[in-house]
Each structure stands twice: as C-alpha cells, then as structure tokens.
Image (cartoon, coloured by chain):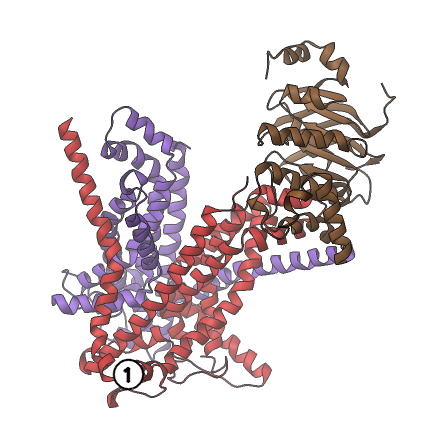
C-alpha cells in the first residue's frame, strides 16, 4: 500500500506511563498530503499517539518511550541534534477545546511569528491577514483585530487557533478531536477547511465521531486498547474491515 | 423529625452568631482604636501627626513621619529583595523542578513560615547584622549593623513563604492548554513559561506580592531587634530606622503614664490597621478576578 | 536561535540560585541558632524556673516560660477552635449561600488575617483596661485567641470547601438535615486538614511576641491562676538577651532552640497525622 508517500513513519513505538502501557508496538505510516483519521474507543491511546508525533509527549512526567518516529525522513527521537521546537513548528496542533491565547485576535496569530523572530510589522500583518482569510475568519474580525480573543464564539476561536498554527507554516496539522467542543455548524466549517487544506498539508485527526471520520478520511488508523488493530485507505476500512474489533467498532458495538 | 429540625436550626443560629462575631471583629478593633486615638487627633491636626518629624512625646509633639518613613524603607528593601527571589523560585518549583525536588523544597519553605519572629530576630543579630556591617564597609559606609538593610533582609526571609506559596499555586493553576499551545507553535519551554507567567498568572502574582507586603508591613519583633530604633527618617539603607510597629512595642509602658502618648501609639496602631485593610481588600479583589478565571469558549 | 537558548540557560541558573538562597536561609537560621544555643541547653534549663539572680548569671531555667507558653497556646487554640469551627462550617454554601453577607464576611476575614499581631496586642490592651483585667494569663489568652482566629478560620475553610458537593447531596437526598450531614460526613472528611490547621494556628500563637508583650506581663514563677501574669518563651528569649551577662545571653539562644524544637515537632506531627488520616478521606 505504499503508493502514497509517507510523511510520518512510526516503527515499533511503545509508550508507558509508570506501570500502565499506553501504546504497544505501533508501526504505521501516515501518507503525505492526505487526511489520516485515527479512530477508536475512548482510552485506546489515540491522543497519546498523536502527541508522540510532535514530541508533545515529552512534557508528561513519568513517560517512557521506545521505538522510532520518522518525520519527513528524520528520526525525531533518536537523531543527534534534533530540536523538539523545530519539530513542533512543522506540525500545527488543534486541541479538543479551543485555546486562544489571552491576547488580542491579531496577537494570537502573530504570536508564533514573533516567537520565531519575525519583527517586520508589515510582513507580520500580511501573514496574519493571509491566514485569517484561509480559515474564513478575516471578514468576521477585520474591524476588531485588536479586541480580546476570548470574546469570540467557540467556533471562531477554534478557527483562530487554526490560523495561529498555520501562520508558522507547518507541514502537517494535528487535530485532537478538534470539533468536539463545537456546535454542528462550526464543526462543519472546520471540516470544510480541513478538506481544502489537504492539498497543501498532511493532516492527522483524532476523532471519536465515526461519521466525521467517514466524511474526512483518506486513510484510517483504528486503535483499541493501546494496540494498532488495522489501518489502510478509508474505503477499505469502512467497507471491508478485516479484524473483528474493527468490524465491531464500525457497526457501533463498541465506542 | 421536628426535633431534628429544631437541632439543625439551633445549630445554624449558633454558627451564624459566631460568624457575625468574627465578621464584626475588624470593625470593633477599628472603632476601639479610633476612639482611643481621638485625644491625640483633637490635640494635633492630622497633617502634623503624619508629616512632622518632631517626636517629643513629653512635650506633646507626636510627629510620626520618621516612623512612617522607617516602616516604608524597611518594607521597601524587603520587597525589593523578596520579589525577584520569590518569583524565580516559584517559577522553578511550578514549572521546572522534578517532583522529588518539589516534594522536599515545598515543606521546607512552609517550615520557614512557622518560625517565631523572636527567633528570626536572633538570627538577624547573629548573621545579618555582621553581614550588613561588612557590606557597608566594602562600599565605604559605616554602620554598626543595626540598620534598614538588616531589617529588610530579615523581613524578606520572613516573607518568602507567603509569596512563594501563593505564587506557586497561581502558576500551577494556569491551564495546561496555554503551555501546549505555545509549545505546539515551536516555542522553547522558557518562552512558554514567560507566556504563562506574564499573561496567565500575572494577577495572582500581584496578589501574592501584595499579601507579602501586608505581612512585612506589620511585622514587629524580628525587625525591632535589628533595625536600630533611632527616631529619625533614614536616608540610606545603612541608616538605622524606627518602624511603626517597633515604636508601639518599645513604648507601651508609657501608655498609662502620659495620656496623650498612649493615644498617639494607639493611633499608630490604627494607621497600621488602615494600611493592612486597604492592601488586603485590594489583594482579594485581584484574586477573585483570577478565580473567575480565564474563560475559554 | 542561540539567544533563545542563552536566555533559557541564564534564567534556569537564576531560578536554581534563588531556590538555593531561599532554602539556604532556612538552614542558615537553624544552624546559627542551634550552634549558639545548644551549649547552654541543659536539663535544668527545661526543668527549673529562674532562681534568684538568674538574669545575672545564676542558676535556674526557663520552665516558667515553657509552661506559660503551653498554657497560653493551648488555651488560645481551644478557644479559637470553638469559634473558628462553626464559622468555617457556616461559610459553606449550604448555610451562608451566595449573599452579600457572604462576600463581606469573607472580606473582613481576609483583613483580619492580615492584621499585624502588634495591633491585636494594642486592641487587647484596650479591652483589658476596659474590663479591668491586669496583664495576665487571661489577657494573653484573649489576645492570642484573636490572633489565631483568622488563621484557623482560613485553614478550616479551605478544607471544608474541598468536601465534594455531591457527597453532601447524597446525604441530603436521604433526608438528613444540614447539621446531621455536617456532623457525620463533613467532619470526617475534614479531619486531617483540620488538624493541620489547628496545629498551624497553635504554632503561630505560641511563637508570637508582639501581641502578648503588653497583655501577659511576665513572671519568674509558674502560673497559678488565670489572673496572674505569666511568662512566655518568646518574651523569655527577649529578656534574657537583654541581660549584661554573656552566659544569660547564651541561654536566650538555648530558649530559642527550645521554641524551635516545639515548632518543628508541631510541623512534623501535623504532616504525619495528615498522611495517616488522608487514607480515610474520599476524594
């Protein structure tokens, strides 16, 4: 199944917190410029796997990790001289609950740029405007760019977070159940944006909504109790699941 | 059942009275001090009491200016020393320290809070007074060691536990999502910490500092033992000072003999109460805003 | 890129240095006092009262102060607890609700917490003059009760607040009154934290000097009645320090060591109790 070029490649990944094993021997490849959806019942390790991809897992205390994760050919855990902050820049993150930073709308998007040293005001403004347009927020906020971000609705906040992530020009976007806190209309808008973005970015989304997975996925990874049960092109997984657990999940028997 | 309800309402009445009693206590204290201050307040205009440097109680002159300045100087030095040290320590404990280190250091700092002020005073005499003496001579001044700096250093150490305890808690309360959002954009841990501290925890940190200031302001015994007790407004950190609490403590014996003297001392207590009142209310207002919190969504 | 790393390294160093300074001052304090005071510590120090000429170098000990401080501390703590517990329980939403009264009460308790001990002393003095009480054990207990009250209320309030509302609702759902819920459920939940709070207040009361300066008087004898003046460890330290004789001055440090030991024991004890009792508390 390697007609699709992998952007991320996971080999033999094991993650444990203290005594409990969160991920067991995960080996999978995530194709470039497609939407890969990770599905599975709650507690199966989907979020843990996602956090391993941009090394955000490093911050949890007491975590032990073994195995390899290659991003664009580079082993992000074991190579010498690899800088986690650079890895994270390559991958934008959209969390479950929208988390706008406590500053103005403009500053939210500009934050990442300023972190990386961009100071030219004109350039910053251009980038901010471009990405707000990309997520369809520009028309709604153009006349209140300096107002606090927390006055936006949840859906707008999540789009703001997306714009913020896109502004630092990542190669991939990771989403941890990004629409679970949003109303149906806002969820739909985010999904639409993802579908538009996939031509430029590799997108990995964790979701527990089967219907959303069906709408978005090009490639599906199904996990259960920390193990990788099945993975493959969306059509195959949804129409012809091979493993019993996958079949049970698709039928809605386990959730 | 009725008997149970009766017990409940009786108990709740008792509890209400205890609460009302406690709530009124501040007012009772304020009123009591005010009544006893009236003699000196009617003998001298308020501006003279607060701004005159002439302190000759036996002649009826009660200029509190030197003592107010003494208090401000000592408290100021203490805060200048304490604030950076406490903020850095709190950030370290909340964001960087491994669990084991946190588990050992936090109880130690709490221990500092329980040490009686006389013991701090002894510590000051043993170690701090000679210290300031040598600092002064290294810088070309002379002092016998009993000065504002000694008072300030001792006071700073006394205030560490208050500020650190609240600050650490405030920083830890900032939701994890903020750090994650920053890191996901490619920031270093320190950049994320700066964001958390400067945006998420700022109000709470200010409240912690204000509360520390309140504690420092009223501290009596330890400062009294190292600060020199000379009734003249200090003009350098190597000058002795005479803070307001020390004034009251040293001269309480006079309260009965010279009537106006007692009134002046109780007026000083009233001034202390007023400052503490303002700062406590201020800190609480800030903390309430923090608790209402950073609302997402 | 390099500047970011440099800044991070610099601040890490500063942070660790600050922490070391803070913890180091604790050690410096303990070592200084213990080193200076330990040589003068003897059995007679803690078993005898000052004999004639004690302050000039002759024999005796500070039993008067030790016993005095214990009487003062225990008396004040018990009295404060009798008031603080009902107040802390009343501050629950079940009783006080979200009224204006609640806000004002909490605010005034905050102010009370910040009031310097010297102001409590001054106020206590006024009360004593008004009631015609001399400087005595009773006077000291009254003032220390006032001093410990806000500390205890705050500590108890924090523990009471942590009792999960669902737990209380289970009790109400079975028809229990507020009083019954409080006695049977809340009190059990708060036990470890409450003990810590009480010991904390006790430690504060026993160590304070400014408030009892004018309200307890001083004596070389053991207290016999509530209306006699009573010695206390903090004041004993202070007065011995003022003696011309260096031996007596050293005894001041020894008395300070005794005080420190009491405070340390309280702290360790309360931590052990908390750890032990927390097993029975529902989260």
Residue at image location 43% in from the left, 60% down from the top:
B211
Subunit of mark 1? B
Residue nearest the viewer, comparing A20 with C11: C11
Chain A is shown in which shade?
Answer: brown
Q: Residue furthest left?
A: C132
Q: Quadrant of residue B66?
A: bottom left
Q: What residue is disc 1 on?
A: B45
Residue nearest the viewer, comparing A132 with C209: A132
Q: Quadrant of the N terminus of chain B?
A: top left
Residue B35: percent from the left, percent from the top? 20, 71
Look at the picture and state if C161 lies above or below B278: above
Q: Quadrant of residue B214?
A: bottom left
Residue C159: percent from the left, percent from the top? 36, 42
- Say few, some or many: other residues with alpha carbon within 10 Å of mark 1 (under 14 / 14 to 19 / 20 or more): few
Chain B is shown in which shade?
Answer: red
Residue nearest the viewer, comparing C69 with B58: B58
Chain C is shown in which shade?
Answer: purple
């Amino acid at each position: 199944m390697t007609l699709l070029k992998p952007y991320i490649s996971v080999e033999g990944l094991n993650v444990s917190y203290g005594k409990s094993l969160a991920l067991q021997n995960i080996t999978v490849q995530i194709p470039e410029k497609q939407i890969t959806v990770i599905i599975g019942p709650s507690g199966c390790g989907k979020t843990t796997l996602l956090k391993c991809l941009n090394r955000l897992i490093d911050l949890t205390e007491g975590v032990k990790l073994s195995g390899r994760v290659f991003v664009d050919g580079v082993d992000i855990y074991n190579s010498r001289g690899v800088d986690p902050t650079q890895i994270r820049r390559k991958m934008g993150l959209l969390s479950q609950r929208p988390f706008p930073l406590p500053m103005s709308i403009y500053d939210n998007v500009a934050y990442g740029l300023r972190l990386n040293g961009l100071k030219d005001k004109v350039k910053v403004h251009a980038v901010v405007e471009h990405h707000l347009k990309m997520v369809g927020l520009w028309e709604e906020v153009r006349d209140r760019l300096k107002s606090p971000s927390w006055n936006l609705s949840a859906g707008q906040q999540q789009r703001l977070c997306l714009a913020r992530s896109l502004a630092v020009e990542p190669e991939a976007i990771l989403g941890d159940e990004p629409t679970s806190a949003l109303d149906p209309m806002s969820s739909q808008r985010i999904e639409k944006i993802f579908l538009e973005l996939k031509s430029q970015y590799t997108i990995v989304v964790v979701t527990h909504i089967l219907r959303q997975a069906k709408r978005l996925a090009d490639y599906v990874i199904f996990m259960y109790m920390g193990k990788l049960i099945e993975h493959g092109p969306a059509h195959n997984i949804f129409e012809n699941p091979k493993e019993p657990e996958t079949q049970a999940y698709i039928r809605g028997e386990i959730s | 059942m009725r008997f149970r309800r009766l017990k409940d309402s009786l108990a709740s009445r008792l509890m209400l009275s205890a609460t009302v009693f406690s709530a009124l206590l501040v007012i009772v204290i304020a009123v009591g001090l005010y009544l006893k201050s009236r003699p000196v307040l009617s003998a001298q205009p308020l501006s003279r009491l607060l701004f005159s440097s002439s302190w000759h109680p036996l002649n009826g002159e009660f200029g509190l200016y030197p003592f107010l300045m003494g208090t401000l100087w000592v408290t100021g030095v203490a805060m200048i020393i304490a604030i950076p040290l406490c903020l850095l320590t709190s950030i370290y404990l909340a964001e960087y320290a491994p669990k084991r280190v946190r588990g050992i250091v936090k109880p130690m700092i709490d221990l500092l809070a329980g040490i009686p002020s006389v013991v701090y005073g002894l510590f000051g005499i043993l170690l701090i007074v000679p210290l300031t003496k040598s600092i002064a001579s290294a810088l070309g001044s002379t002092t016998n060691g009993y000065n504002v700096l000694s008072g300030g250093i001792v006071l700073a150490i006394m205030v560490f536990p208050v500020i650190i305890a609240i600050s650490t808690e405030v920083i830890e309360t900032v939701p994890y999502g903020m750090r994650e959002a920053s890191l996901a954009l490619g920031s270093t841990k320190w950049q994320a910490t700066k964001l958390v501290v400067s945006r998420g925890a700022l109000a709470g940190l200010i409240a912690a500092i204000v509360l520390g200031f309140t504690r420092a302001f009223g501290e009596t015994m330890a400062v009294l033992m190292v600060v020199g007790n000379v009734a003249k407004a200090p003009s350098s950190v190597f000058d002795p000072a005479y803070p307001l609490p020390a004034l009251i403590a040293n001269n309480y014996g006079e309260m009965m003999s010279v009537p106006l003297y007692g009134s002046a001392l109780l007026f000083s207590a009233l001034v202390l109460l007023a400052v503490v009142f303002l700062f406590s209310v201020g800190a609480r207002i800030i903390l309430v805003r923090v608790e209402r919190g950073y609302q997402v969504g | 890129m390099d500047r970011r790393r440099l800044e991070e390294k610099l601040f890490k160093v500063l942070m660790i240095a600050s922490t070391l300074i803070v913890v180091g001052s604790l050690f410096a304090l303990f070592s200084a006092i213990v080193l200076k005071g330990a040589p003068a510590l003897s059995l007679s120090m803690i078993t005898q009262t000052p004999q004639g000429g004690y302050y000039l170098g002759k024999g005796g000990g500070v039993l008067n102060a030790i016993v005095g401080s214990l009487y003062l501390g225990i008396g004040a703590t018990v009295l404060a607890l009798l008031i603080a517990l009902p107040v802390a329980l009343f501050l629950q939403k079940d009783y006080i609700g979200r009224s204006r009264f609640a806000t004002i009460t909490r605010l005034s308790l905050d102010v009370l917490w910040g009031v310097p001990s010297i102001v409590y002393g001054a106020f206590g003095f006024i009360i004593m003059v008004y009631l015609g009480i001399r400087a005595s054990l009773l006077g000291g207990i009254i003032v220390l009760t006032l001093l410990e009250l806000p500390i205890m209320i705050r500590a108890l309030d924090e523990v009471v607040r942590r009792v999960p509302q669902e737990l209380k609702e289970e009790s109400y759902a079975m028809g229990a009154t507020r009083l019954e819920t409080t006695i049977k459920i809340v009190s059990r939940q708060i036990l470890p934290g409450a003990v810590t709070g009480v010991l904390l207040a006790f430690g504060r009361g026993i160590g304070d000097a400014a408030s009892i300066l004018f309200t307890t008087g001083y004596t070389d004898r053991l207290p016999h009645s509530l209306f006699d003046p009573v010695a206390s460890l903090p004041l004993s330290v202070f007065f011995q320090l003022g003696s011309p004789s260096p031996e007596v001055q050293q005894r001041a440090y020894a008395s300070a060591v005794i005080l420190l030991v009491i405070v340390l024991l309280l702290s360790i004890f309360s931590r052990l109790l908390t750890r032990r009792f927390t097993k029975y508390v529902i989260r």
